[in-house]
Amino acid sequence: MAKIDEWLNNNTFHYGQFWDIKRLINTKEKRNIKVSLCIPTLNEELTIAKEVVLFKSELVDRYPLLDEIAVIDSGSTDRTLEVAESFGADVYLSSDILPHQGTRRGKGENLWKAIHQLSGDIIVYVDADIKNIHPRFVYGLVAPLIYRPEIHYVKAFYDRTLADETGIRPSGGGRVTEILVRPLFSLFFPELAALIQPLSGEYAVRRHVLERIPFPIGYGVETSHLIDVYSEWGLEAFGQTDLDRRVHRHQPTRELGKMSFGILHAFLTRLRSRGITGEMPPLTPILRQFQVNEGKYEQVVYELPEEERPPMIDIPEYRERFGANDN
Amino acid sequence: MTHPTLATQDSGRWVHDLPVSLGDYREMLLANLIMIGEIPAPAFDEAARIEFVKQRFTECGLQKVSSDSAGNGLAVLPGQNGGRSILLTAHTDTPFPDTVAHTLTVSSDRVTGPGVADNSLGLAALTTLPTILEGLGLGFTHDLVFMADTRSLGKGNLEGLRSFLTRADIPILAGLTIEGVQLGRLDYISLATLGGEIACVTDTTNGTANADTIAALNQIITRLRNIPMPGEPLTRLVLGSIAGGTSYKSPAHSATLRFQLRGESDTVVDGIAEEILTICEEVATDLELGVNFDVIARTRAGGLSPGHPLVQNALAVQESLGINTLAPAHSSAASVFLEGGLPSLTVGVSRGENRGGVNEYVDIKPTLKGLAQVIGILRAIDGGCCGED
């Protein structure tokens, strides 16, 4: 696993390395790179204003790192879009983008449609529920792509624990990462286990990569990205940046079950398509959980269709808009 | 040079229209507010917040960006003629320790979080102003000194501002202090105030060890409330906070009262402070425990008259902007300027409530008028309403 050590040394960053934003912007301009920010939303009225204000003021007006800020919404019933627009974001309803392709419900759908709607050479995705939002959430992810042309996909990770007296600290992800995703990666794609937080919702990616990978519409989108990008471009295409600390909503265990279900769907589908496993029965979209209601046990059934959107490069409207060819 | 007053029609119209021009800076002010407000800055521990403000001062091209011995963050916007400087201040500290989560939330019309009104918004306004002045192409005759001052609250007792005015070799023409709230305040007088702390502690030196410090503090409070407070000159005693003990079942080994005595006369306040000291000594002797009386903050009475040209010009600015001027309140900062013989005003940038709580908030909409007001008053001072060099 010397390759993992080498990759950790060369492709793991701390946002503090990129404090000189003027230099970053100079390099961006020299290389003629456009950067778009996509914030996928669903009922984020309470947190969206802060993100838009901060990113627009700091990374559009003061330091022009971002060429556009777009909120792509799944159909919020609160004032998410109105608030975001009032502070200067471009706002879109996911269902209005590529209307001929229909509408699916899920975060992955918004991320996929953003590729068509946004114009940047780099798209950086940032979740809308981050309470301690800061410009580092964008420049820390974009900078490795601007400085290092061989890197295509940069993931965020967050330090969660303080060093103990030995100076060694476990650096890891959340519950789903450590119980499900990292063990699966260790078994089937060991090099991907080096990504400290594979499920983080913050990442920056080059357009030419995004347009060539499929998008599960639900919880499996991050996992599938990692496997697909790894399979095509290798571990060297990845970078990861320590953004220090992320304060967000805590997910109840039942929600983590749904997340794990979506991830397993995406994972098993890829094992099968790569011939890593033999024949498997069709994967059901039904997740069963259980609860006690007035002393009786009963099942709670969720239908979680893990449909996947095809690579955007296969969509005619996209090819027309961006003049894409088969190369 | 004439002394243009903003009460003149042209100046009044210019100020009236200014908030529209400031619309482009709203997000910058809010972004600075968020980033400043999320850096904890309890009094005596403001260094991280000061560093951020100094970085901003550097980014917008101010000169002499530095810290002084009190830790104040300083920078200068040079004027055309130099001479005496106008000091623009906002205190950096908040009443919240760094153990409180300093996470601000932003809605379409307000920003909420600990310290956002007192005084993260005031400091954000100070930090944003240099960029606004440059963007509007506004030049000044006098140097503008921007100061994020430290150790203002509680035991800080305005130490940062006091230290700067005592030690700085920069001649100052006048001071303008920016607070987050309330828009419409125009504070130009200083009351005589005394912030005090009375601590009752178990005295183990004589072996009797009377541990009932809460009862002792109760006795002291009863006697404090019996001190006659004169109505003329107006004097008040505010009992602000008490703390003591560790458990419901054990006598408290310590109990503390914090209070403020405020009035229009230094002599009266000093006299009452003597009475309080006597009460403490008597209770200590009677109950055989330790009673310590510490003065943690003190300001002197004085200030400008309502007819002072600075006050009149500031009133004209507020009127031009349609700001309802609030009844004048006392400003502790004015007391420190007064010690240096300097005229000063304190103004607020916006409206807000819940000061001192984690749900403290400020309204976004009034901030543009609040900023316009600061610029209008700065121009009045620069134009000569406080006299010349």
Image: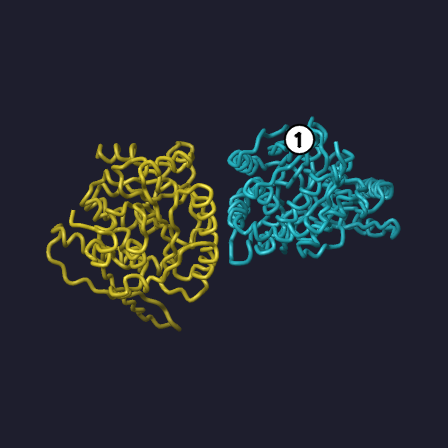
Chain colours: A yellow, B cyan
Give the left or right position of residue B36, taking residue B85 as reference. left
- Label 1: which residue? B81
Q: Residue at x 81, y 45 (%)?
A: B305
> Secondary structure under badge 1?
loop
Pick the front one: A141 or B1: B1
Q: Quadrant of the N terminus of chain A?
A: top left
Give the left or right position of residue B107, taking residue B279 as reference. left
Q: Is residue B198 visible?
A: no
Q: Residue B186 at what x, y percent from top left?
A: 72, 49
Q: Residue A230 at what x, y percent from top left?
A: 21, 44
Q: Residues within 10 Å of mark 1 (few under 14, many from 20)?
A: few
Pick the front one: B209 or A101: A101
Q: Residue at x 71, y 34 (%)?
A: B162
Q: Residue A269 at what x, y percent from top left?
A: 18, 56
Q: Quadrant of residue A35?
A: top left
Mark 1 — on which chain does it sit?
B
Q: Residue furthest top?
A: B169
Pick the front one: A321 or A216: A321
Q: Is residue A78 visible?
A: yes
Pick the front one: A239 or B312: B312
Type of amino acid at the residue the image marks with label 1: Asn
Q: Residue at x 27, y 54 (%)?
A: A221
Give the left or right position of residue B36, taking residue B344 as reference. left
Q: Quadrant of residue B123?
A: top right
Give the left or right position of residue B5, taking residue B90 as reference. right
Q: Residue A178 at what x, y percent from top left?
A: 31, 47
Q: Residue at x 16, y 52 (%)?
A: A271
Q: How many marks?
A: 1
